Image (tube, helix red, strand yellow):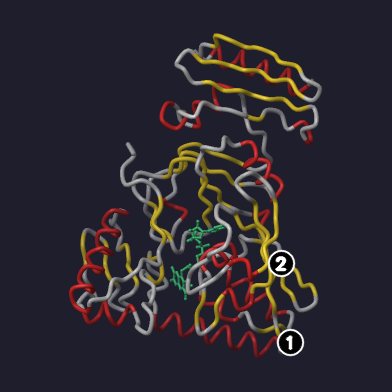
Amino acid sequence: MHCRSNWQQNCKNAARNGHKWSEIRNQKSETRTQLSCRLHDGIRADVIFSAQTPACAGVTFVGVGSNMLRDASIKDVMNTAANWPQVRGTYRFDAPLAPTNWFGVGGPAELLFKPADTEDLAGFLAALPTDVPVLPIGVGSNLIIRDGGVRGAVIRLGRGFTGLSMHGDLVEAGAAVLDLHLARFAAEHGRGGLEFFAGIPGTVGGAVAMNAGAYGGETKDVLVEVEAVERSGRILRIPEAECHYSYRHYGGPEGLIFTRAWFRTEPDTPGAVHGRIEEIRAQREATQPIRERTGGSTFKNPPGKKAWELIDHAGCRGLAREGAEISPLHCNFMINTGTATAAALEALGEEVRARVAADSGVTLEWEIKRVGNVSPDL
Ligand SMILES: Cc1cc2nc3c(=O)[nH]c(=O)nc-3n(C[C@H](O)[C@H](O)[C@H](O)COP(=O)(O)OP(=O)(O)OC[C@H]3O[C@@H](n4cnc5c(N)ncnc54)[C@H](O)[C@@H]3O)c2cc1C
């Protein structure tokens, strides 16, 4: 009843804010009360209360008109209908995304949600209208977010996903744990096998999504199982075999947000493992522009070849356009030297692909994920 009166208050508030509610109808059933609301501009929001909703979570959209994304933004619908969803994490509309990625580019997220924990994320996804697209991001070390921003909900995992613990020879890590912290945690417990993560500046979730790897090690070699939340809000576990990994590619069930993972380790001494971690870090520092605004390897290595050699041979080392540059230090790395837009970075990447194809006949495949809209109008 408490939630219901909140809802009614929200309707009144919405009306006071200039929204015209032409119809509010109650349909009582054994387990729920449904309030169907029709706005004069044709947007419909069917809102449900469920007496069985855990913790009286309040309001769940069950059928926002399918034209929602064309006719109204999530903000319109959420602001007009109710203060939904009630989450323990935080969400923000029109949230700038440039600060969330290594290149420092890109337009805003229509909605940026930072869940408090896995259950909070599951509740949010279950309540989110099914036609709203969802994009999980880690620390954006492998992303170009386009200048027009991202439609729908961007999910960024934070503090509630940074747990690390040992279970026999397995390390359990939250999806927001940095790869370096994962490697160091295993070392502190006298466990080896995860050292290669020390050179990858992403999160555990990003590593699982990308099959990240370095120095002969790949995520798939050490991953045992991963926990994920489906778009519907269902929480599930997937064994490594069902991730169908290949080089820098996850081929398992789609549309998942990874929340936790378990990694296999080998017994070793902390000193030896820490030593190998430091070696990897020193080598990185010497050979890669790791202090620049970059996205790591831009293109995948084609079978039997090295992308950087093809790029070098095509004369692209140091190639620069509108603030975007092919690193003179490592020519499979692109850099934002300060003023590049996402469009400039993408255009430079495409120019490199065209030059390499003309020079060697090889078509390079992007390793960096490019997401979002080129222009805000799309
Ligand atoms: C200097 C530098 C060096 C690098 N060196 C390497 C290297 O040696 N080897 C290597 O493999 N990579 C390397 N990278 C690339 C990058 O660090 C990895 O791909 C990393 O795994 C990306 O993690 P992230 O958290 O930054 O993910 P993001 O870049 O934020 O996202 C990458 C992809 O993963 C998805 N994703 C992220 N989190 C989740 C989640 N929780 N659930 C579902 N999907 C998710 C995103 O939707 C996106 O498609 C390097 C990058 C830089 C900048």
- Type of amino acid under label 1: Pro
Circle 1 sits in a helix, a strand or a loop, which is it? strand
Other-residue count near label 2 (Cα within 10 Å), few / some / many at <14 / 14–19 / ≥20:
some
Q: Position of residue 83 (x, y in %)?
A: 62, 27
Please identify, in this view, whether the residue under mark 2 or under mark 1 is nearer the observer.
Answer: 1
What is the quadrant of residue 324 in the picture?
A: bottom left
Q: Position of residue 70 (x, y in %)?
A: 41, 30
What is the quadrant of residue 318 in the picture?
A: bottom left
Decide which of tag 2 and tag 1 comes sooner along the chain.
2
Q: Residue at x 48, y 74 (%)?
A: 247
Examine the rendered structure and indicate whether residue 66 appears above or below residue 342: above
Circle 2 sits in a helix, a strand or a loop, which is it? strand
Front-most of 257 and 154? Answer: 257
Which residue, given by chain and number where applicable, does mark 2 sit on?
Answer: 164
Mark identifier at residue 320 = none
Left or right, 4 with reference to 66: right
- Type of amino acid under label 2: Leu
- Count up the numbered dots: 2
Q: Position of residue 354 (x, y in %)?
A: 21, 68
Q: Residue at x 79, y 20 (%)?
A: 1
Mark identifier at residue 267 = 1
Front-most of 339 and 50? Answer: 50
Other-residue count near label 1 (Cα within 10 Å), few / some / many at <14 / 14–19 / ≥20:
some
Q: Position of residue 94 (x, y in %)?
A: 45, 38
What is the quadrant of residue 226 in the picture?
A: bottom right
Left or right, 196 with reference to 28: left
What separation in Å lies between label 2 and label 1 (alpha carbons)? Answer: 18 Å
**Quarter of the image that includes the C terminus:** top left
Left or right, 128 with reference to 270: left
Front-most of 348 and 40? Answer: 40
